[in-house]
Image: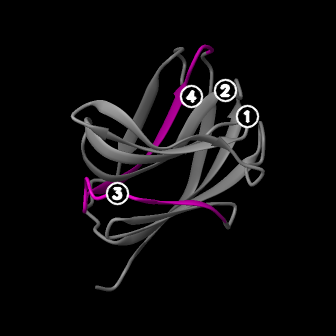
Amino acid sequence: MVESADYSFWSVAGKNFTDAVVEVETYQVAGPDNNNYGLILRYQDDDNFYSFEISGDGYYTFSKSVEGQFFSIIPWRESAAINLGQAANLLRVEAVGRDFALYINDELVDAAIDSEFSEGDIGLLAGTYDEAGAHISFDNLRVWEMAE
């Protein structure tokens, strides 16, 4: 549970992946719908990584942090693929080279190209904006490494 307003936290697996498919089942248990939660990819350290996030009010984004500065690769966009509010959502990213395919509930919602990070750890993140109390659960984190 994210108990502070305007706060995000994450945890990583302590592994290293290059080309991989990463998938996780998410569930917004309680709290405000104006939140953010999802996957971290190609994590180098707390200041350098990619993230694929959704919100309980039906939006998604794909961004990167470079030296602690966040850049939107795909700015927040609304998607009918997201189950709103206190609901389950399946998130998946296929990361191959500089190509990223983004899925929500088995629907391809977007794709991106970026070459900032070519490998790194994976993780999960959750955060809040104006209102605290976002309670997000994650289950069945799966990773498939792609053959070179």
Measured Cα–Cα span from mark 1 to mark 3: 27 Å
Give the amino acid type for the residue marked by disc 1 in the picture: Asp
Q: Which residue is mark 2?
A: 34
Task: Say which element carries label 2.
Answer: loop
Pointer 1 local density, CA inside 10 Å: few below 14, some 14–19, many at least 20 = some
Measured Cα–Cα span from mark 1 to mark 2: 6 Å
Confirm or deny contact between disc 2 and disc 3 (CB under 8 A). no
Q: Is residue 146 above or below residue 52?
A: below
Q: Is residue 7 above or below residue 78?
A: above
Residue 147, located in which quarter of the rendered image? bottom left
- Mark 4 or mark 2, which is nearer the start of the sequence? 4
Give the amino acid type for the residue marked by disc 4 in the picture: Met
Q: Which residues are magenta?
A: 108-131
Q: Is residue 61 above or below residue 96?
A: above
Q: Residue at point 76% right, 44% down?
A: 87
Q: Where's residue 117, x and y in %?
A: 25, 55
Task: State which mark lies toward you, 4 or 1.
Answer: 1
Pointer 2 local density, CA inside 10 Å: few below 14, some 14–19, many at least 20 = some
Confirm or deny contact between disc 2 and disc 4 (CB under 8 A). no
Q: Which mark is residue 57?
A: 1
Q: Which residue is mark 3?
A: 114
Q: Please give left or right for residue 27 compared with residue 99 in the image.
A: right
Confirm or deny contact between disc 1 and disc 2 (CB under 8 A). yes
Q: Which residue is mark 4?
A: 1
Image quadrant in which the N terminus is located:
top right
Q: Where's residue 25, x and y in %?
A: 62, 56
Q: Where's residue 89, x and y in %?
A: 69, 52
Q: Please give left or right for residue 103 compared with residue 93 in the image.
A: right
Pointer 3 local density, CA inside 10 Å: few below 14, some 14–19, many at least 20 = some
- Mark 2 or mark 1, which is nearer the start of the sequence? 2
